[in-house]
Amino acid sequence: MKDTFIKLLKDVDLNEPILIEALPGIGHVGKLVAEHLIHELQAEKFAELYSPSFPPQVFVDENGIIEPMKNEFYYLKSAGVDQRDYIILVGNTQGLSPEGQYDICGAIIDFIDKLGVKSIYTLGGLGTGQHVEKTKVLGAATTKELTKMLEGYEVKLRSADGGIIGASGLLLGLGMSRGMEGVCLMGETPGYFIDADASKAVLKTLINILKLEVDVAKLEERAEETRKMISKAQQMEQEMSDRMHVTPGDEDLRYIG
Amino acid sequence: MKDTFIKLLKDVDLNEPILIEALPGIGHVGKLVAEHLIHELQAEKFAELYSPSFPPQVFVDENGIIEPMKNEFYYLKSAGVDQRDYIILVGNTQGLSPEGQYDICGAIIDFIDKLGVKSIYTLGGLGTGQHVEKTKVLGAATTKELTKMLEGYEVKLRSADGGIIGASGLLLGLGMSRGMEGVCLMGETPGYFIDADASKAVLKTLINILKLEVDVAKLEERAEETRKMISKAQQMEQEMSDRMHVTPGDEDLRYIG
Amino acid sequence: MKDTFIKLLKDVDLNEPILIEALPGIGHVGKLVAEHLIHELQAEKFAELYSPSFPPQVFVDENGIIEPMKNEFYYLKSAGVDQRDYIILVGNTQGLSPEGQYDICGAIIDFIDKLGVKSIYTLGGLGTGQHVEKTKVLGAATTKELTKMLEGYEVKLRSADGGIIGASGLLLGLGMSRGMEGVCLMGETPGYFIDADASKAVLKTLINILKLEVDVAKLEERAEETRKMISKAQQMEQEMSDRMHVTPGDEDLRYIG
Amino acid sequence: MKDTFIKLLKDVDLNEPILIEALPGIGHVGKLVAEHLIHELQAEKFAELYSPSFPPQVFVDENGIIEPMKNEFYYLKSAGVDQRDYIILVGNTQGLSPEGQYDICGAIIDFIDKLGVKSIYTLGGLGTGQHVEKTKVLGAATTKELTKMLEGYEVKLRSADGGIIGASGLLLGLGMSRGMEGVCLMGETPGYFIDADASKAVLKTLINILKLEVDVAKLEERAEETRKMISKAQQMEQEMSDRMHVTPGDEDLRYIG
């Protein structure tokens, strides 16, 4: 296996869908949001991505059943007030090497470009390494118009104090060269545990912006469930990956997507 | 040399053979089992795999003779009660980089897919890092039916407390996408020495499941022989590789296949 | 995204242009010089380079706007006394892996070869790790004639006390196999901060050699501006990259280009 | 630059030439031997190898002149008593990554296979990490006949106490799959300095075996010269590479070729 490939499970016909990306990252912030959206809005899986740049392993679930490393694409028709379509991207891992990240994100951009995506929202946590009194949502965007829009929703713009590392950054960067625009929303989190508060803050901001109707209260339950169901291995994997992407002692370059 | 390749030494015609994988890993657990099966059942080598993702070196054997890094395929016709064919995969090394592991395991899956394999057994040790009173055999599988079957043979299912790293995990993960099903059997071992007890436990479980008739007693002798014959370099190589695949301080992600 | 590519923004017709390379390196020495030349001589951007060997991330600027990782080519028609054309190569990053550096520098050499480049100047800082009383400019070149020329401009030749690591070295090495000749100019700097003094010394030497007319005084202002504008992330990125390229405790192999 | 390539400087017609490999390694043992042979027997350079798997840098020589990273092939017609032809392989670097080593050694094997090579001698040092009273020459070979031949020349066979890492091992391993046979000769050396004694011991053994007539005494002078001429950078590079290839604290896996 030398190439990243996407296995299409179902043909879909989408109308300029918006991509919401929430691959594993600090505090499972984005992942919880995406899983909540998938469940509440009954999104349907239509494609899977496999890559030789994923970690060379499998996970074992709570019943001893083997689960391969993969990313998954769900879709949602005519959701929200203005009846737009969505693609939600989740998974149990990200690419391991820098070149692998480019390979995988490039394959994702090729795939969503053909599906008509013009707009990307990437979600994640912003690790503070200390207790967070009240979660703020920080943001960055590919255009001035979008940063102004974000300020209208009380998102604090990240000033020039850091980069966005991993899929949450790279998808926006690579998307720009295809004329896609996008936004990254980051919930402040101490990091290193499943943080429902940060997820709730990001979810509220996202559904406000996208005018989606979703029951926010239930996310707390889901976080509890996730805490139980998620294998220790996945948490470890996550922590390993977190540590890998963050420069040690590097307080400001702490965002992982 | 840029590509992994398999050198066919003999054309074989096999009837839905079962793959038994036992590449080097913790405590030489799988390797001892596979070498015992090859010897006792007189399996014949029919192919060799070479890869640029193996360590860039050769071994020197006890007579000063150079031995290249390779994986080897043996076959066995109509073995056991229900007269099935087998392929046994052994070797003196595994892939070094994550991408290399995918490349090699992908090449193996392509090769055995053409030979008609529908079922995979991967064998290994599960390092406990401490003295093991009575070796337990742990297992995981690709389907619910197989996990139930394992429980019928007193295999303890691994619950969601870890991943399976290396060829023993990846072959099962990649095989799933080709419709192959499989099982991983892991013998508890302190690790870092040649563990005949763990091997015996895995061998007993395996031959029970597959209904093979093999003299288990002789395995102890073989372990002793292996201890003497195996070059220090191979042991070191193994330990290096073990350390590489295990996250330091990571008690639960301790399986290496 | 598997391949480095160059996006041509404007067709240019240049007469045996000289390449001036100043990708990020120790003390931002080369980068400040190149940015000063681009601004003062009003060079125009005509191409951008993107690579899967860049770090897998984006930068966020002081307004919360996302900026992808890239290298940029500017051109200058008939500059200086002898009316030669120039290409100036700058960027916010260099390749991360050794193979990535070869891939990117190879793509640059292919590109500038087609544009008629026969001569290359690479600029950088030479980290001393201690306070620098009066910045010396050190140099190395691909031919004996060029080393003599350098001595005529009071450039101290580096004797056999180190290599030139990164794009500043590799572009010269790869250029040689295409019949290009070249020079590397290095300003002594303590390293690890934006060093306008080292930049000024390199700038003066460069414009003396190339007979360019440029206001040197303004470079101090530009350094100040850069200190303010440059995102912390970029500085960190730089430092990470510096540390990566320098062997720890390796006093003499301290040049980064 | 994505591929290793060999630049042919002169067409040569050789009669089943023997390859002598002496790329940089511990104590410059092999390199000194090869340079001595090239000089004394007036071997002529006929090809150069360049690779993206070399370190991404250039060397600066004692006159400030830039030297790219490369391997070089010399040839020798009808040398020695039995009038055989030789190819001598030297260089200022080896491949950096494991995959790079395979890529480069594979390219070398392809090249020499076409030139009719059936027999390979690889030379190197065997680091002892302590003072060496009287240098022993150790050996390993690809066949039983060759190990017996070595014992006839008072070469001590390496028993199963280690691997041969790098080009000296890999060329023999890859050559085996093309029907080439070979020998590795290793001179014991404390390592980490230019060791003329170890080189002299290896040279004497080699010319005894190959029945070459070479003035051994002059090698001492050459070592002195090399000590002066070799750039510090090259020594550092060497040490870095040594450290990279040796597992820390690994007394028995200490051979580098």
Image: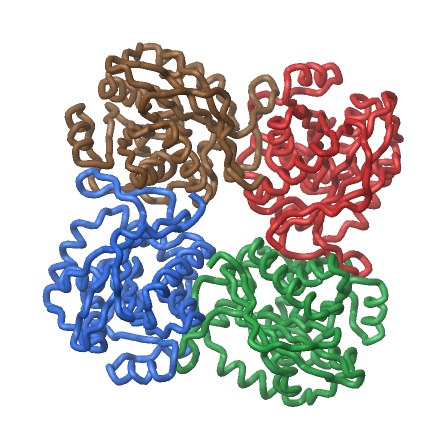
Chain colours: A green, B blue, C red, D brown
Confirm whether residue C234 shows in the render: yes
- Horizontal side, residue B13 vs residue A111: left or right: left
Q: Residue at x 14, y 57 (%)?
A: B224
Q: Position of residue B257 (x, y in %)?
A: 34, 63
In the figure, C194 relative to D147: above or below? below
Left or right side of C60 for B192: left
Front-most of residues C143 and B146: B146
Query: Where does the image place residue D43, in percent across and percent down from the top left?
Result: 40, 15
Closer to the camera in the image, C20 or A250: C20
Question: Which residue shows up at 20% across the image and 60% down it?
Answer: B35
Q: Is residue D217 above or below residue B33?
A: above
Quarter of the image with the N terminus of chain C in it: bottom right
Please name the residue shown 21% across and 66% down the image. Answer: B199
Quarter assignment of residue D161:
top left
Which quadrant of the structure image shows residue D145? Answer: top left
B148 sits to left or right of B231: right
The residue at the point 42 percent across, 20 percent down is: D12
Front position in the image: A227 or C78 = C78
Is residue A188 shown to the viewer in this render? no
A34 lies above or below A184: below
Q: Position of residue A143 (x, y in %)?
A: 82, 62
The x and y percentages for residue A162 are 70, 58
Query: The C terminus of chain C appears in which quarter of the rendering?
Result: top right
The answer to which image quadrant residue C14 occupies is: top right
Q: Residue B171 or B205: which is nearer the viewer?
A: B171
